[in-house]
Image (cartoon, rainbow, N blue to C red):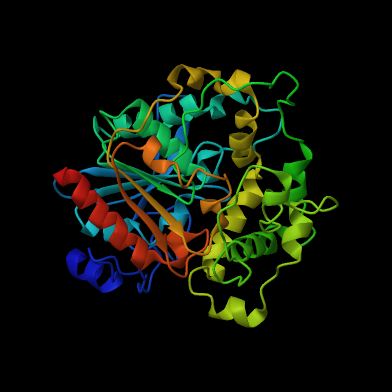
């Protein structure tokens, strides 16, 4: 009866079809998204033994032990952004684990503030979070680590630092980045971001629900102004060519910028990749935690004292099978001029570069079937390597 119920509830297959929850009852095995996440997906809280207990969504956990795949979300996202990957990847033979990362969602027991300790958000510690999570789950090796947006650099460093554990890597949206050498001329750099950013988001006049709706829409393929192209250099004139969600007007913050890009009611009503039920999951969690946890990932990048340990790995390449996936309508591909073109010098075994048609920044949600096929094919190819 359980098997019949599972088959009736979910349409996921190894070919990568969209997950649909057709159950008459909520999924009582998850802590959020119970009306949307299908049965066969569950929540757990896992102590990483690295100073944080992470809430995870997982699938493929029953039956004989399967190879593990870890999915790392970006900003402002949650493990929930992988809802359409969990069962298809599990059906392809994997134990799929998607955590709310440090400072996000149910992995944050309370709102994160600007004055909270920043060191735990350093890149090495974030790698420690992922390594601690998979070891706590009983894995000494991970078939692949997949990261989107800010999850991308974390996935990249997992593979760069512990290739014997993370046996392949996928970076989505964020190109594979150099392990930069020691920079010059940083003595006068301001080491922190302004504390007002979190308050600008938490106290957005339009409310967090509408702010997130605008944010996701503005960066998606649904907003027809997203027509990215390579930039020539890291200069003000070149960077100003990007949309306002990257380069804002001087007199506007994020909330005001997003407020100018509210989708029309008809667009909201017909949006299948971000329904009101989906949006409510995000809005509920970010209302509770604020955005500071995610903003801390940016802050540590601006303080050499917090990520200085990475200097020891300057110019170190990524030597496991790697794959890059971006959206054909997203600017993240080109926001760091030259990075997209240099990926083959960063990854010695880059096996694929894909720009998914009709996808903006939220690839996993906008075009899940296409993404699932790419991931499943890459995992199979990597295991043969």
- 22 or 90, nearer to the observer: 90
Residue at (46, 16) in percent of width and height: 312
Residue at (41, 63) in percent of width and height: 356
Residue 293 position (above or below residue 172)? above
Q: Quadrant of the C terminus?
A: top left
Residue at (56, 70) in percent of width and height: 276
- Name the image quarter holding residue 199: top right
Measured from the top left, where is residue 319 in percent x and y? 30, 33
Residue 380 position (above or below residue 155)? below
Residue 254 position (above or below residue 129)? below
87 vs 307, left or right, is left
Measured from the top left, where is residue 208 in percent x and y? 69, 57
- Name the image quarter holding residue 39: bottom left
- 50 or 159, nearer to the observer: 159
Residue located farthest toward the bottom when viewing the structure as drawn:
266
Q: Is residue 102 visible from the viewing direction of this image?
A: yes
Q: Is residue 34 visible from the viewing direction of this image?
A: no
Residue 194 position (above or below residue 256)? above
Q: How many marks?
A: 0
Measured from the top left, where is residue 107 in percent x and y? 50, 39
Measured from the top left, where is residue 256 in percent x and y? 79, 58
Q: Quadrant of the N terminus?
A: bottom left
């Amino acid at each position: 009866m359980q098997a019949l119920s599972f088959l009736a509830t979910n349409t996921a297959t190894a070919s990568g079809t969209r997950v649909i929850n057709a159950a008459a009852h909520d999924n009582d095995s998850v802590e959020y998204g119970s009306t949307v996440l299908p049965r066969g997906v569950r929540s757990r809280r896992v102590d990483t033994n690295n100073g944080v207990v992470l809430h995870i969504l997982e699938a493929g956990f029953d039956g004989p032990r399967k190879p593990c795949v870890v999915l790392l979300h970006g900003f402002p996202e949650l493990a929930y952004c992988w809802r359409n990957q969990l069962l298809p990847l599990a059906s392809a033979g994997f134990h799929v684990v998607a955590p709310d990362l440090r400072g996000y969602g149910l992995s944050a027991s309370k709102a994160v503030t600007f004055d909270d300790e920043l060191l735990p958000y350093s890149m090495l510690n974030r790698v420690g979070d992922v390594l601690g999570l998979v070891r706590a789950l009983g894995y000494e090796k991970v078939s692949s680590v997949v990261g989107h947006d800010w999850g991308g650099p974390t996935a990249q460093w997992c593979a760069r630092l512990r290739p014997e554990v993370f046996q392949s890597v996928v970076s989505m949206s964020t190109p594979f980045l150099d392990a930069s050498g020691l920079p010059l001329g940083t003595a006068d750099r301001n080491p922190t971001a302004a504390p007002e950013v979190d308050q600008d988001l938490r106290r957005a006049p339009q409310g967090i629900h509408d702010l997130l709706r605008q944010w996701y829409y503005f960066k998606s393929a649904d907003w027809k102004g997203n027509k990215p192209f390579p930039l020539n250099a890291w200069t003000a004139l070149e960077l100003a060519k990007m949309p306002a969600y990257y380069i804002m007007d001087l007199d506007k913050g994020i909330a005001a910028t997003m407020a100018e890009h509210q989708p029309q009611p008809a667009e909201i009503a017909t949006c299948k990749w971000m329904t009101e039920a989906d949006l409510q999951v995000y809005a509920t969690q970010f209302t509770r935690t604020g955005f500071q946890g995610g903003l801390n990932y940016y802050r540590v990048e601006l303080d050499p004292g917090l990520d200085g340990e990475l200097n020891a790995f300057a110019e170190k390449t990524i030597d496991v099978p790697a794959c890059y996936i971006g959206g054909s309508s997203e600017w993240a591909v080109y926001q760091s001029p030259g990075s997209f073109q240099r990926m083959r010098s960063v990854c010695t075994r880059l096996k694929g570069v894909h720009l998914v048609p009709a996808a903006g920044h939220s690839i996993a949600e906008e075009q899940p079937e296409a993404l699932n096929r790419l991931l499943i094919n890459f995992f199979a190819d990597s295991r043969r390597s």
